[in-house]
Image: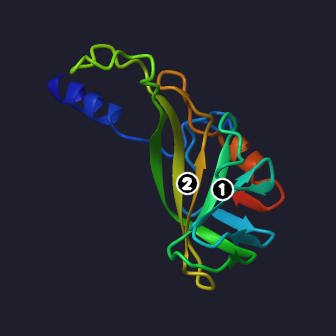
Amino acid sequence: MRWIMILLLLSACTQSYMVSDNLAYPYNLPPIGSKVVLLKRVAIEPGTTRTFLQRGRSTSLGDFDRYRANCNFEVDKLSDRVQQIEPDTFVVKRVQRLTTEVVRNHADKPRFFAVELDRGSPIVTHGYHLWLSSEQQPDVMRITCRGAFDDLSRAEPPSIDEIREALGEIAELVLAT
């Protein structure tokens, strides 16, 4: 009986890549071996390493809607020139969960307290880093997809359907089977 309890406890700590066949479920991670097929060239502006996609359009960090799913392609080298990512098929070689605290408003807190007793719930976004591999474009490092930002207790990562909506006709996410 003791071994059964240990086995159940250990299995509860493992993570599964696919927990549901429902592509609208936000906790399905794209499996390793999936492909990101870039159908149209995307440009990365000088002085940055990423370009954002949302609702099937390229957008800048300052212009995308933080209340909708979004993705960004990222390269590993900073340049003072425009960098182009050409149409290609990228293989997902690693999937990594992501949580980022986006905003915390301290403006309404008294400034004379040395210790903050009620920090409140942070505003976060959850998502996934999909680490990519391509022989033709080895400098394309990853695509990161995030869900809408919200309170910590309500924020969810993007579903496969939301990732596909963010990519639109610029790129296609093909899941490994």
Q: Is residue 78 visible?
A: yes
In front: 12, or 67?
67
Report the residue at 36% width, 40% height from top: 14
Quadrant assignment, res 84: bottom right
Q: Residues within 10 Å of mark 1 (few under 14, many from 20)?
A: some
In front: 30, or 62?
62
Circle 2 residue = 31
Q: Colour mode?
A: rainbow
Q: Residues within 10 Å of mark 2 (few under 14, many from 20)?
A: some
Instruction: In the displayed orientation, state which residue is furthest to the bottom.
Output: 136
Name the side, left or right, on which 59 lies relative to 156.
Answer: right
Instruction: In the displayed orientation, state which residue is furthest to the front.
Output: 112
Instruction: In the displayed orientation, state which residue is furthest to the right.
Output: 169
Q: Picture coordinates of residue 31 (x, y %)?
A: 55, 54
In the picture, the quarter occupied by the C terminus is bottom right
Q: Are marks 2 and 1 in contact (CB under 8 Å)?
A: yes
Compared to residue 69, the image places residue 75 above or below, namely below
Where disc 2 sits, the SS reads loop
Q: Is residue 176 visible?
A: no
Report the residue at 44% width, 26% height from top: 122
Name the side, left or right, on which 143 lies relative to 4.
Answer: right
Name the mark on residue 175: 1
In the picture, the quarter occupied by the N terminus is top left
Q: Picture coordinates of residue 52 (x, y %)?
A: 67, 56
Q: Picture coordinates of residue 86 (x, y %)?
A: 73, 78
Count of numbered tags:
2
Callout 1, which amino acid?
A: Leu
Report the residue at 56% width, 78% height from top: 79
Callout 2, which amino acid?
A: Pro
Name the mark on residue 138: none
Report the residue at 67% width, 47% height from top: 70
